[in-house]
Image: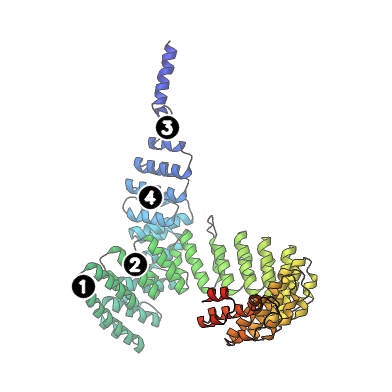
């Protein structure tokens, strides 16, 4: 009896939804995540783990998320919820890691956190990130060979030219002085630039940023000096014009437009709306090709886009160095494509589910420069085929077609190459008989090679070959070789019109209506009224006269239509009546209907 009661109680527990309670993992740190394991849909399971991790402030639960992007978002949210910057280092995507770390600059000991990262590039990136966030150059000395790049990034982030003094590389140091001088509006930093033209351009930018015409007087080159004075004056007057607007939104829009047109980044600083200010920085950076301005943008995505755009327009890779992962490769690819420098493609290693940056880089440059050999560097089969196919079609390069693995694409490529070069020998590379014959036929029509059609085995393809060739060469003898009437008749009609030979239409014997239409078409084009007399059918004869008469024009031509020798007067006049009816309709002349003999036709006409 006790056993029965026990089973009954168990049944009540199960049926009341307490099953999860019976099977909770006692070792689970986050009870909120237990139910997620039972879900079968991967997206739903990921979202469940993410929500449970955020609710329970447990970064370990985030690691159960299979989708990389969702997992990184989970870690970022937990890090922010706990104010624990160490969790940011668990984020795989470098951009999201930066966003996370930027929001928690004081939340953790950067040096201690970076030592937990595996040695090598990842740890160096961590120290560079730490230097940028904390504005502390001590971290740069822990980055090994990346020290100078780290100091450059820090100097730009801090807008501090003094940091440039510690850079040992002369080229990077000069770039640092040029970049930070404008950001800091520090003309003294410009003086440290060795190249005179760059130094004076730097001074010009600082003068405009400060709206300080006195700095222009330190520029010795007359053209740059004059430009400096003009730009400072424009910046001053335009800025005052925008400042007079009371509506903040309109004032921001005015300043944004002014900054873009005057190419003066300092104007952006007056914008109140944070989003518009960052958009302003991006626009000016692109306008003048100054990547240092991109570092004023706090939104990482917009900053990255800005750096890529400026790098591409300048055709240099220096700005790409501050990026990482897919962002860096997109940047390098854009520069490689802009400069058509395929050597850059060899340094790209990021692979996605859909493509590799190296493949995109090599393919794009190959197509832009018509360098077929570059397609050989493409690794993915579909991308490689597309590269060879594109160049084979553009260059009529049969060797490119031979490297395509997809049979259909390869043979289509050969057909295009053969037609482009008017060389039917290229068709011999095509193994599919139908495609081979179509290739030979097409080339024969383009090249005028009459013997080529003879090698076509398929009857229909051979007929099409003869027809194409006949039309191309305007030779009736080739049209006569065609057997299939559906191919032969259009060939006859075309040549009859082209050669003004209505009698050639009589070669159409399987369908007399088509023959009469052919004669009428030729008569209309050539104005040969005699051709109409050959047509025995009364309606078609009348239409032939009418069409020629309308074309001449001669609206009395119907009077010349011969009456049929027959006792029935209506039938005898049928061809002539048809002619009058057509002309009345085409010329919008109802008075012509009065000439119609047949009463029924006359009434329909009027």
In front: 194, or 326?
Answer: 326
Density class for disc 4 (Cα within 10 Å; few <14, some 14-19, many ≥20) is many
The Cα–Cα distance between marks 2 and 1, rounded to whole angstroms, is 20 Å
Give whichever of discs 3 and 2 has the lower sequence position.
3
- Tell me, for residue 76, which label it has, or none: 4
Of the residues tagged 3 and 1, which is closer to the observer? Answer: 1
**Count of number-bearing discs:** 4
* Label 3 – label 2 distance at C-alpha: 50 Å
> Does label 2 or label 1 sit earlier along the sequence?
1
Tag on residue 245?
A: 1
For mark 3, does the 10 Å Cα neighbourhood hold few (<14), some (14 to 19), or many (20 or more) residues?
Answer: few
**Residue farthest along the top direction in this orientation:** 1
State the SS at label 3: loop
Taking the image as shown, residue 490 lies to the left or right of residue 112, namely: right
Determine which quarter of the picture holds residue 167.
bottom left
Instruction: Look at 47% across and 51% down and name the residue there.
Output: 118
């Amino acid at each position: 009896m006790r056993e029965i009661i026990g089973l009954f109680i168990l049944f009540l527990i199960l049926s009341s939804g307490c099953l999860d309670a019976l099977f909770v993992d006692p070792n689970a740190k986050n009870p909120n995540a237990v139910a997620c394991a039972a879900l079968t849909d991967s997206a739903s399971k990921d979202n469940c783990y993410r929500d449970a991790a955020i609710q329970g402030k447990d970064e370990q639960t985030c690691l159960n998320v299979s989708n990389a992007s969702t997992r990184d978002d989970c870690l970022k949210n937990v890090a922010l919820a706990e104010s624990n910057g160490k969790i940011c280092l668990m984020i795989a995507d470098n951009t999201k890691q930066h966003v996370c770390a930027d929001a928690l600059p004081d939340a953790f000991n950067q040096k201690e956190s970076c030592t937990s990262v595996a040695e090598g590039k990842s740890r160096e990136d961590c120290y560079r990130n730490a230097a940028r966030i904390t504005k502390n150059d001590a971290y740069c000395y822990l980055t090994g060979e990346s020290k100078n790049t780290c100091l450059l990034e820090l100097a730009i982030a801090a807008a501090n030219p003094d940091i440039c003094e510690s850079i040992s590389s002369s080229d990077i140091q000069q770039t640092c002085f040029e970049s930070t001088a404008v950001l800091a509006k520090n003309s003294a930093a410009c003086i440290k630039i060795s190249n005179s033209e760059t130094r004076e351009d730097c001074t010009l930018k600082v003068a405009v940023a400060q709206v300080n015409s006195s700095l222009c007087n330190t520029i010795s080159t007359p053209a740059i000096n004059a430009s400096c004075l003009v730009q400072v004056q424009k910046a001053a007057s335009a800025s005052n014009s925008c400042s007079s607007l009371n509506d903040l939104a309109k004032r921001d829009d005015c300043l944004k437009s002014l900054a873009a047109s005057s190419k003066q980044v300092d104007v952006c600083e007056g914008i109140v709306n944070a989003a518009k200010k960052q958009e302003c920085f991006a626009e000016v950076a692109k306008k003048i090709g100054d990547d240092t301005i991109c570092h004023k943008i706090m939104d990482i995505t917009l900053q990255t886009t800005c750096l890529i755009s400026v790098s591409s327009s300048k055709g240099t890779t220096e700005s790409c160095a501050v990026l990482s992962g897919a962002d860096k490769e997109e940047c390098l690819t854009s520069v490689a494509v802009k400069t058509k420098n395929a050597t850059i493609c060899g340094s790209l290693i990021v692979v996605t589910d859909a493509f590799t940056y190296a493949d995109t880089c090599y393919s794009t440059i190959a197509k832009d420069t018509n360098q077929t050999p570059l397609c050989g560097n493409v690794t993915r089969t579909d991308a490689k085929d597309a590269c060879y196919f594109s160049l084979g079609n553009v260059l009529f390069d049969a060797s490119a077609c031979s490297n395509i693995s997809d049979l259909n694409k390869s043979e289509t490529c050969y057909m295009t190459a053969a037609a482009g070069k008017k060389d039917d020998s290229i068709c011999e590379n095509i193994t599919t008989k139908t495609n081979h014959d179509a290739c030979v036929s097409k080339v024969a029509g383009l090249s005028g090679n009459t013997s080529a059609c003879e090698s076509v085995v398929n009857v229909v393809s051979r007929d099409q070959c003869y027809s194409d060739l006949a039309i191309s060469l305007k030779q009736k003898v080739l049209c006569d070789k065609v057997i299939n009437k559906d191919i032969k008749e259009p060939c006859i009609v075309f040549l009859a019109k082209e050669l003004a030979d209505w009698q050639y239409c009589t070669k159409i014997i399987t369908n007399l209506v088509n023959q009469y239409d052919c004669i009428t078409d030729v008569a209309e084009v050539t104005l040969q009224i005699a051709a109409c007399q050959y047509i025995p059918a009364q309606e078609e004869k009348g239409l032939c006269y009418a069409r020629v008469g309308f074309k001449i024009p001669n609206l009395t031509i119907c009077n010349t239509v011969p009456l049929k020798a027959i006792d029935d007067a209506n039938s005898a006049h049928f061809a002539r009546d048809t002619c009058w009816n057509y002309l009345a309709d085409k010329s919008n002349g109802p008075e012509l209907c009065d000439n119609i003999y047949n009463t029924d036709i006359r009434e329909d006409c009027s």
